Amino acid sequence: MPGVFVGETKSLVFPVMCDGYLQLKYLEKNENTSVDLALREGVWGHTDSFSIEAVITPYDVNGYGSSGSTSIGVGDSEKTPPSVNSDNSSKTDYMSEDYFSTTRLDRKLMIFHNANFQFYLENTTTTNVNQPAEYRLGVKVQSQSPVVSDSIIRSHNTLYGYYDSEGKYDGISTSETLVSGSYVSQPKEALYIESIIKVGCTFHINGTVQLFINGDLIKEGLITVADFNFGTTDCYIGQDPDTANTQFMGELHEISMYKSPKPTISSTTLSPGYNDILFYYRFGE
């Protein structure tokens, strides 16, 4: 019987500019790295199709950038990082600049990492001047080229403004105006930092990979797969600890990997079949 919960939704929080992850250790399930593949426990023994899903609230890695001013953007939020104005001659003195530098524009938010399988969000913006981060969903299997969607988590809303030809929002010398003739700027914090979003990926052993958001298929690709398995290395939720600029920043409400290569029915929560679960974590209860 499903549980019934009342009150605010809880989550595992990764604040902006944090350094943290959950580690799924191979050796906690298996005696050593010489264990035969057919005898491995946990995800490391799985060699067939599977799905991974997560319910998340992504934070903005861009921050509210500016130029020609002394602004530091939003300086009092764990969901939006400070952003020193681009022409500040002393900007390297700021912690946020030391943490991000130019990497905020192509930063990955790693949801799950294993040497043979990575599932993540990736910022696609080319500027952060009045431009919050916008994310595409991606997956990389073994050494194959990643399969990525278009930008699907966006900060803008047509009630607030539109893009110009350079990808910037109204209010920063753009060509688009409202009927009244006045420019419309975006809020200093992206709308999605208060949203709950379900992201998912199905991997079919024949090489078909599908990406989903809120249960809707947004991308399908075909890759070449050779004897897929998760190897004998640890798995990580929230970061690839060996690669820079992969820290997940946001809230993780639920995450699950299970044997069936199709998304679960609900668009707001996870409901994997008990016998299919490879791992399942629900935070904050």
Image (cartoon, rainbow, N blue to C red):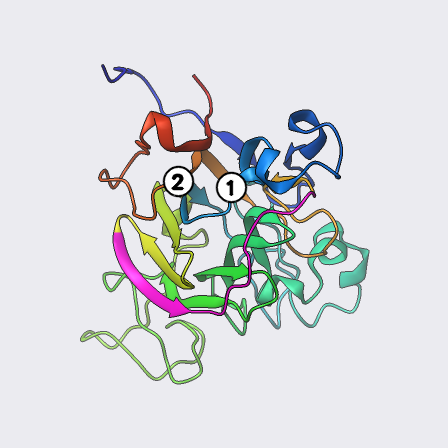
Q: Determine whether, in the image, residue 57 is placed left or right of residue 231.
A: left
Label 1 to label 2: alpha-carbon separation: 8 Å
Q: Which residues are magenta?
A: 216-232
58 versus 101 height, above or below = above
- Answer few, some or many: residues within 10 Å of disc 2's Cα (few below 14, many 20 plus, some between 14 and 19): many
Give 174 or 14, whichever is nearer the viewer.
14
Q: Residue at x 42, y 41 (%)?
A: 56
- Could you tell which of marks 1 and 2 lies nearer the N-terminus? 1
Q: Amino acid at mark 2?
A: Lys
Q: Secondary structure at mark 1?
A: loop
The residue under label 1 is 46
Give 136 or 236, whichever is nearer the viewer.
236
The residue under label 2 is 259
Does residue 14 show up magenta in the picture?
no
Give 98 or 3, whichever is nearer the viewer.
3
Q: Residue at x 39, y 66 (%)?
A: 151
Does residue 224 show up magenta in the picture?
yes
Residue 246: x %, y % from top left: 63, 53
Q: State which quadrant residue 83 falls in.
A: bottom right
Q: Pointers 1 and 2 in contact (CB under 8 A)?
A: yes
Give 126 or 164, whichever is nearer the viewer.
126
262 versus 171 height, above or below = above
Q: Farthest residue in the left direction?
A: 179
Q: Amino acid at mark 1?
A: His
Residue 37 is marked as: none
Residue 45: x %, y % from top left: 56, 38
Q: Residue at x 27, y 40 (%)?
A: 264
